[in-house]
Amino acid sequence: MATSKVLAGAQVVLPTGTLSNGRVIVDGTRISGSAPADAETVQLDPGHWVVPGFVDIHNHGGGGASFTSGTVDDVLKGVHTHRLHGTTTVVASTVTGEMDFLAQRAGMLSELAEQGDIAGIHFEGPFISPCRKGAHSEALLRDPDPAEVRKLIDAARGRAKMLTLATELPGGIDSVRLLAEHGVIAAIGHTDATYEQTQEAIDAGATVATHLYNAMPTLGHRAPGPIAALLEDERITVELINDGTHLHPASFELAFHHAGAARTALITDAMDAAGFGDGRYMLGPLEVDVTDSVARLVEGGSIAGSTLTLDRAFKRSVTVDGLPVEDVVRAISANPARLLGMYDTVGSLEPGKDADLVVLDAGFDLVGVMRKGEWVVAPH
């Protein structure tokens, strides 16, 4: 059972700034404003950091297990793998498949969401562009049909959080409006849209850019395409995969600078191999080879998700890209929590919220993870 603890001595990142020699008081499963008399003191190194648990809104699996096709136990294994790397809140993402199969997956995943194991469901495909399909089966792609979008929403029983679609396809704008009406994030991705078409989708209610840069036209000086429209609009939060493979550091830094810490969400887009290792895997119906931690389709060689975990994304953002720790915390915890409508319970270290937190050492390597007051990884 969760007990009362006082984490003391480290640098604590709060929404108002970083507190040196700070304290985080945990009472049961929540963060508290005052310490009970019997609270255990956990003394941390002054060079360590205590930050909110990470929130991943785009994740297909990990630990050798798939959210897209695995059993309930597989999904729980994947969730646990990412918890070991600091992700205390995760949305399970699907990939393109037959509509009946996706509806069936949504039903199973919604039960796990109801139990609190995952935060909800993200449908990536099948309503995406064949020109920008990435690691999705072209044979299963289809134009967005509001009736079919509604079928997936209904199958998720209120647990659908996001759907990625190519909004320029026939039915795309109507589908965005339908998603917005049902409180589901319409995410623009795997798209061949023009700058103007992207603006139209944003005006219709789209609010997220699915892994900005990846699976969309490049930024052009005469045809700026979706990247410029997504970066410049204050209504859009941009997902970024900061693994050193999906994005050149200059592209990552350009996007982070332009969208700012308030409009960026660091994601993994992880597949089964995350936290597991190299080898041959399946992503939906497609075979994937993972070599040196880079996942590519066996046929065609497209990048097929990532093997990233958010602790590595955090460290890279600070040590390679030179971002302030507070900005990275916003992008990896607060912003995704807000997008999911969960900021009242997760995403920052404030009294009343779930005691979800990560302890990092002075070099930004993970040394501790707590979820709802229980150590997943005890500080070492």
Image: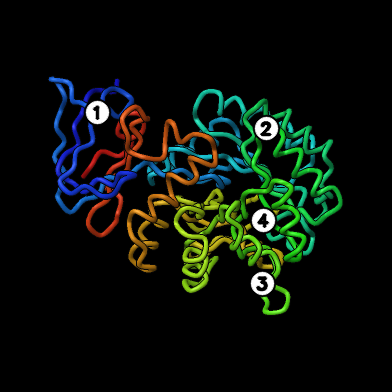
Instruction: Give the CA separation, mark 4 to mark 1.
Output: 50 Å
As drawn, the label of residue 218 is: 3
Closer to the camera: disc 2 or disc 4?
Answer: 2
> N-terminal of the two: label 2 or label 4?
2
Per the rendering, the mark at residue 245 is: none
Q: Residue at label 1? A: 33
Q: Kindly report which numbered mark, 4 or 3, lies closer to the viewer in this rendering.
A: 3
Q: CA distance from mark 1 to mark 2?
A: 38 Å
Q: Secondary structure at mark 3?
A: loop
Q: Pick whichever of labels 3 and 1 is earlier in the sequence.
A: 1
The residue identified by callout 4 is 287
Q: Nearer the viewer, residue 343 or 190?
A: 343
Q: Which residue is mark 2?
A: 106
Q: Residue furthest bottom?
A: 221
Q: Nearer the viewer, mark 1 or mark 2?
A: 1
Between the C-alphas of marks 2 and 4, the distance is 23 Å
Disc 3 packing (10 Å; few <14; some 14–19; many ≥20): some
Q: Earlier in the sequence, mark 1 or mark 2?
A: 1
Q: Nearer the viewer, mark 3 or mark 1?
A: 1
Among the 4 quarters of the image, the one containing residue 223: bottom right
Horizontal and vertical percent position of residue 369: 32, 40
| N-terminal-most mark, 3 or 2 | 2
Q: Would residue 137 be visible to someone looking at this image?
A: no
Residue at 41% over, 50% down: 330
Alpha carbons under labels 4 and 3: distance apart: 27 Å
Q: Nearer the viewer, residue 174 or 146?
A: 174
Camera-near label (4 vs 1) is: 1
